[in-house]
Image: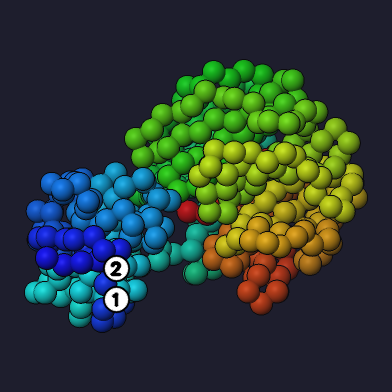
């Protein structure tokens, strides 16, 4: 019998909560060996005594302590990758000895990263002068862009929004019938067809989207100028019906960004000021809408997050871009200041982020898309440059991928 730091008696092959020799990481092949011993390689199993879950037999204390609930309530309900990602944190903190099955698997000596960081890429979508959606991918590590290609199966598009979950990009559009449509792009680049959003929706004026883990949160301004929202967990879930976001009316435009399990929603009111409210999806609660300090005469907004900080961008009534930041771990809003890269004549903006870098895109008065990168680790911005292979752009949306 083994005993955890919580005083729970263990028997057989299960993860224990002792602080032991350190190890950094292990390959998927090594974790498969551990899982074969721990659970017979069954990543959805629960131990006979009900204390240990999933392929690596992680107990609920460790699952919660190391952040597993961002994926699922229990390890056996999470994917293999998600279980391994939490196991990596346990391994780094407690060492290979946390698993009684570790001897002979190479867990203490295999320091490979099981899931190396993918290339830092953004996906940029645009509505062309023909009202068709086009998409391009930026590889920020290589400094290259793909060409713009038409997204399959779309016509008559008025507005777009995009969000990413692990392994997929989700694109939403408002059609010329004022209904919302959606299409998903897999990691291999293949698209599904555009289908109407199952949740009843009519008379939509504008949309925005943000993701927390595997769930996309979609926001829509209805023909009554109120904001509505619907959610879908892309790990086997279905769309909820649209329901009203509390405490809002007279909304002209919206944007959203996520930090952790919280989505920060921004709106332009009928007084042309920016307001914000937070949806804590862990607690299932919304804050009231409050005015973002120091803003007037706003035409359009977009937002992107780096860590716990949201960077909010706004087009002012002088058609220039302004920006303000807030660290949501105890920070307050900075003042709105002109965006560092010189800009003017801006019609529309969108933003995405990779690591500490925000990628800001704008449509100029020549209907061409421009991009600039802000490195928030050292406080520097690039100049705006023309994104290759675009002209006649009406609208844009961006997401990381």
Q: Can you give x and y, in whole percent of width and height, for residue 276 in the image?
A: 73, 44
Is 387 placed left or right of 35 in the picture? right
Q: Nearer the viewer, residue 133 or 400?
A: 400
Q: In which quarter of the image is the N terminus?
A: bottom left
Q: What element carries label 1?
A: loop
Dot 2 alpha-carbon crowd within 10 angstroms: few under 14, some 14 to 19, many 20 or more = few
Dot 1 alpha-carbon crowd within 10 angstroms: few under 14, some 14 to 19, many 20 or more = some
**What residue do we see at 87% from left, 53% from top?**
294
Q: Which of marks 2 and 1 is in front?
A: 2
Residue 5's tag is 2
Q: Can residue 144 be seen in this view?
A: no
Q: Can residue 261 be seen in this view?
A: yes
Is 387 placed left or right of 18 in the picture? right
Q: Are the residues flagged by discs 2 and 1 in contact, CB closer than 8 Å?
A: yes
Q: Which of 101 and 314 is in front in this view?
A: 101
**What residue do we see at 64% from left, 26% from top?**
244
Q: Can you give x and y, in whole percent of width and height, for residue 350 in the image?
A: 67, 49
Q: Which of 156 and 10 is in front in this view?
A: 10
Residue 19's tag is 1
Q: What colour scheme governs how the chains and residues are painted in the rendered image of this protein? A: rainbow
Q: How many labels does the image show?
A: 2
Q: Can you give x and y, in whole percent of width and height, for residue 9 in the image?
A: 18, 61
Q: Nearer the viewer, residue 173 or 214?
A: 214
**What residue do we see at 39% from left, 60% from top?**
65
Q: Relative to residue 330, is residue 160 depicted above or below?
A: above
**What residue do we see at 27% from left, 56% from top?**
59
Question: Which residue is the extreme one toward the front?
Answer: 7
Quarter of the image for residue 127 reads: top right
First along the sequence among labels 2 and 1 = 2
| Mark 2–mark 1 distance (CA, rounded to whole Å) | 9 Å
Quarter of the image for residue 5 reads: bottom left
Residue 253's tag is none
């Amino acid at each position: 019998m083994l005993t955890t730091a919580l005083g729970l008696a263990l028997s057989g092959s299960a993860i224990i909560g002792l602080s032991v020799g350190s190890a950094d990481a292990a390959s998927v092949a090594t974790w498969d060996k551990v899982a074969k011993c721990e659970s017979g390689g069954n990543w959805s199993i629960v131990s006979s005594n009900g204390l240990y879950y999933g392929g690596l037999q992680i107990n609920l204390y460790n699952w919660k302590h190391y952040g597993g609930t961002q994926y699922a309530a229990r390890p056996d309900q999470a994917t293999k990758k998600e279980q391994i990602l939490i196991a990596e944190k346990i391994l780094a903190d407690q060492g290979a000895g946390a698993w009684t099955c570790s001897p002979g698997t190479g867990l203490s000596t295999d320091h490979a990263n099981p899931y190396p960081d993918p290339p830092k890429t953004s996906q940029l979508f645009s509505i062309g002068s023909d009202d068709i959606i086009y998409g391009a991918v930026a590889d920020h590590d290589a400094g290259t862009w793909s060409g713009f290609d038409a997204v399959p199966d779309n016509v008559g598009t008025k507005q777009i929004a995009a969000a990413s979950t692990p392994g997929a990009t989700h694109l939403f559009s408002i059609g010329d019938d004022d209904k919302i449509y959606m299409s998903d792009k897999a990691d291999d680049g293949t698209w599904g067809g555009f289908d109407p959003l199952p949740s009843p929706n009519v008379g939509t004026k504008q949309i925005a989207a943000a993701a927390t883990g595997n769930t996309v949160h979609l926001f829509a301004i209805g023909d009554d100028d109120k904001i509505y929202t619907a959610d879908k967990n892309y790990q086997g879930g279905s769309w909820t019906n649209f329901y009203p976001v509390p405490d809002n009316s007279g909304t002209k435009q919206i944007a959203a960004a996520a930090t952790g399990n919280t989505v920060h929603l921004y709106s332009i009111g009928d007084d042309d000021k920016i307001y914000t409210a937070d949806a804590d999806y862990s607690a299932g609660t919304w804050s009231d809408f409050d005015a973002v300090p120091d803003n007037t005469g706003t035409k359009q907004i977009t937002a992107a997050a780096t860590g716990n900080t949201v960077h909010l961008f706004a087009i002012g009534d002088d058609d220039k871009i302004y920006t303000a930041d807030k660290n949501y771990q105890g920070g307050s809003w900075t003042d709105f200041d002109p965006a560092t890269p010189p800009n003017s004549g801006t019609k529309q903006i969108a933003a995405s982020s990779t690591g500490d870098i925000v990628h800001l895109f704008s449509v100029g008065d020549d209907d061409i898309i421009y991009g600039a990168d802000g490195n928030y680790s050292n406080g520097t911005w690039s100049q705006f440059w023309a994104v290759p292979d675009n002209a006649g752009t009406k609208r844009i949306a961006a997401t990381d991928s």
